[in-house]
């Protein structure tokens, strides 16, 4: 690899890494502030707060990673243009080094984002679920105060009458309103938190389970013994396909072993792979708008970083509302980026009277 290629690749990578590092720190701090109730209300330590915020970071970081790469590339190109280094690259025949440097950075970024999407994010989601369940179990077993309503997660409120020996809870009450179509209420004379080796179980004794549906229909089930998984009342949403906490290696292994490739698994794998296409598209777009120096002076100059942000926002909107899946925006972004880059790179005939 030539020195010019290494120099340009380093400029692209440094700007992208600095920006992504700043974004990660800000996202982690925001997660800590949003979850500070686990310290003030749920009786956990600052360390637990930091770990929970860290587990919640990969999904958010993945959403901003390709944007940081695009802004890093376009910022480096703008700096090269301001220092006139970009002009020298063009007139000295170093354009191939520019493409190679962008290709190296893009390839590394694609590998990183695919690693995050297929492995790190699902495992972080799983660990976050486990930690959330552990916090809820600790809240119910020891930190929950008698005769005081406490929100375990948005939509789930708990109340206990008191505590007895051996960790037993008297007069247990839980109200679950996370599902707008169904309201669930758990009432039991006694309750106790135990572990089955894989998670935490809330053992309810001599109680009733009440269902209230959206149409007003009411159902009631009485029981002498009912085991409730703590994860069922500690997660922010009821509907979960079970794939968010499983990495792609496990999904592919199970499908290969059973020979069943259901649509949910295939769509999840494609959605995770689409993150790599977003990197390709945003880098191509950044090169198209920033790799070609121009002598034109605009009265109102729109920052190139803002263009990248606006395009990324539009891509997310297309992906969210497209009937063809969340990868639609990634394909469209890549097509636009490659098309604009190819159009601006295409050799043009010299003007008449101007030497070639």
Image (cartoon, rainbow, N blue to C red):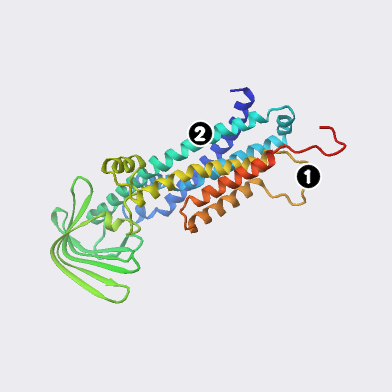
Task: Find the residue positioned furthest to the left.
Answer: 224
The quadrant where residue 294 appears:
top right
Q: Position of residue 296 (x, y in %)?
A: 78, 44
Does 1 appear above or below 129?
above
Q: Secondary structure at mark 1?
A: loop
Label 2 packing within 10 angstroms: few (<14), some (14-19), many (20+): few
Task: Find the residue positioned furthest to the right.
Answer: 353
Task: Find the residue positioned furthest to the bottom.
Answer: 216
Which residue corresponds to the image point at 47% horizontal and 58% vertical from the top-left?
A: 323
Direction from residue 153 to residue 16 in the image, left or right: right
Label 1 packing within 10 angstroms: few (<14), some (14-19), many (20+): few
Does 235 appear above or below 349?
below
Direction from residue 72 to residue 268 in the image, left or right: left
Does 102 appear above or below 320?
above
Q: Position of residue 202 (x, y in %)?
A: 20, 56
Does 270 appear above or below 7?
below
Q: Please tell me the numbered disc located at residue 58.
A: none
Q: Position of residue 293 (x, y in %)?
A: 73, 38
21 or 268, which is in the foreground? 268
Give the CA distance from mark 1 to mark 2.
34 Å
Q: Position of residue 298 (x, y in %)?
A: 77, 49
Which residue corresponds to the image point at 69% horizontal and 50% vertical from the top-left?
A: 302
- Quarter holding the C terminus is top right
Q: Secondary structure at mark 2?
A: helix
Instruction: Work out whether residue 350 can be spotted.
Output: yes
Instruction: Work out whether residue 57 can be spotted.
Output: no
What residue would you read off at disc 1?
Answer: 296
**Marks 1 and 2, the one that precedes in the sequence:** 2
159 or 15, which is in the foreground? 15
The quadrant where residue 162 appears:
bottom left
What residue would you read off at disc 2?
Answer: 108
- Quarter holding the N terminus is top right
């Amino acid at each position: 690899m030539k020195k010019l290629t290494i120099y340009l690749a380093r400029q692209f990578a440094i700007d992208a890494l600095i920006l992504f590092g700043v974004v990660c720190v800000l996202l982690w701090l925001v997660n800590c502030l949003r979850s500070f109730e686990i310290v003030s209300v749920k009786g956990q330590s600052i360390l637990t707060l930091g770990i929970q915020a860290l587990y919640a970071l990969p999904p958010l970081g993945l959403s901003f990673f390709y944007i940081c790469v695009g802004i890093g590339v376009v910022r480096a190109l703008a700096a090269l243009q301001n220092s006139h280094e970009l002009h020298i690259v063009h007139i000295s025949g170093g354009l191939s080094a520019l493409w190679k440097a962008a290709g190296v950075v893009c390839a590394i970024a694609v590998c990183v984002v695919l690693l995050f999407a297929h492995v790190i994010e699902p495992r972080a989601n799983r660990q976050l679920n486990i930690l959330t369940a552990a916090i809820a179990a600790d809240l119910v077993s020891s930190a929950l105060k008698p005769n005081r309503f406490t929100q375990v997660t948005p939509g789930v409120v708990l109340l206990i009458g008191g505590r007895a020996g051996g960790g037993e809870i008297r007069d247990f009450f839980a109200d679950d309103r996370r599902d707008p179509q169904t309201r669930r209420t758990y009432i039991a004379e006694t309750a106790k938190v135990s572990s089955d080796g894989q998670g935490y179980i809330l053992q309810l004794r001599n109680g009733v389970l009440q269902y209230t549906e959206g149409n007003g229909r009411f159902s009631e089930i009485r029981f002498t013994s009912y085991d409730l998984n703590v994860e069922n009342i500690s997660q922010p949403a009821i509907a979960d396909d079970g794939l968010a906490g499983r990495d792609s290696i496990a999904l592919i292994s199970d499908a290969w072993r059973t020979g069943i490739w259901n649509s949910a698994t295939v769509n999840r794998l494609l959605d995770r792979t689409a993150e790599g296409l977003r990197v390709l598209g945003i880098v191509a777009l950044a090169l198209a708008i920033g790799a070609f120096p121009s002598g034109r002076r605009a009265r109102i100059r729109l920052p190139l970083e803002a263009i990248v942000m606006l395009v990324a926002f539009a891509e997310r909107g297309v992906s969210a509302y497209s009937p063809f899946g969340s990868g639609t925006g990634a394909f469209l972004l890549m097509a636009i980026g490659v098309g604009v880059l190819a159009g601006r790179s295409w050799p043009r005939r010299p003007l008449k009277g101007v030497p070639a």
